[in-house]
Image: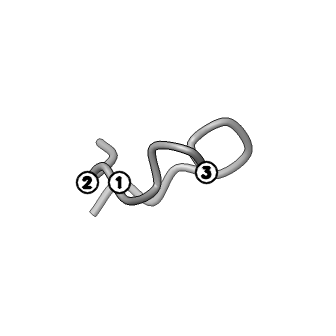
């Protein structure tokens, strides 16, 4: 779901691109 760039942001928001 997370590309990896949002790996730190997945805690509050998952991009899922």
Q: Position of residue 11 (x, y in %)?
A: 67, 36
Total labels: the figure holds 3
Mark toward the viewer: 1 or 2: 2
Q: How far separated are the C-alphas under marks 2 and 3?
A: 11 Å
Q: Is residue 7 above or below residue 15?
A: above
14 vs 4, left or right, is right
The residue pinned by badge 3 equals 9
Q: How far separated are the C-alphas under marks 1 and 2?
A: 7 Å
Mark 2 burial class by Cα count in 10 Å: few <14, some 14-19, many 20+: few
- Under circle 2, the secondary element is loop
Q: Which mark is residue 3?
A: 2
Mark 3 burial class by Cα count in 10 Å: few <14, some 14-19, many 20+: few
The residue pinned by badge 1 equals 16
- Under circle 3, the secondary element is loop
Q: How far separated are the C-alphas under marks 3 and 1?
A: 11 Å
7 vs 12, left or right, is left
Q: Is residue 6 above or below residue 11?
A: below
2 vs 8, left or right, is left
Mark toward the viewer: 3 or 1: 3
Residue at x 65% of width, y 51% of height: 13
Residue at x 56% of width, y 45% of height: 8
To which quarter of the image does residue 16 belong?
Answer: bottom left
- Under circle 1, the secondary element is loop
Residue at x 33% of width, y 46% of height: 2
Residue at x 45% of width, y 60% of height: 15
To which quarter of the image does residue 5 belong?
Answer: bottom left
Is tag 2's residue or tag 3's residue first in the polypeptide sequence? 2
């Amino acid at each position: 779901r997370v590309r990896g760039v949002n790996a730190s942001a997945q805690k509050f928001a998952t991009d899922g691109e």
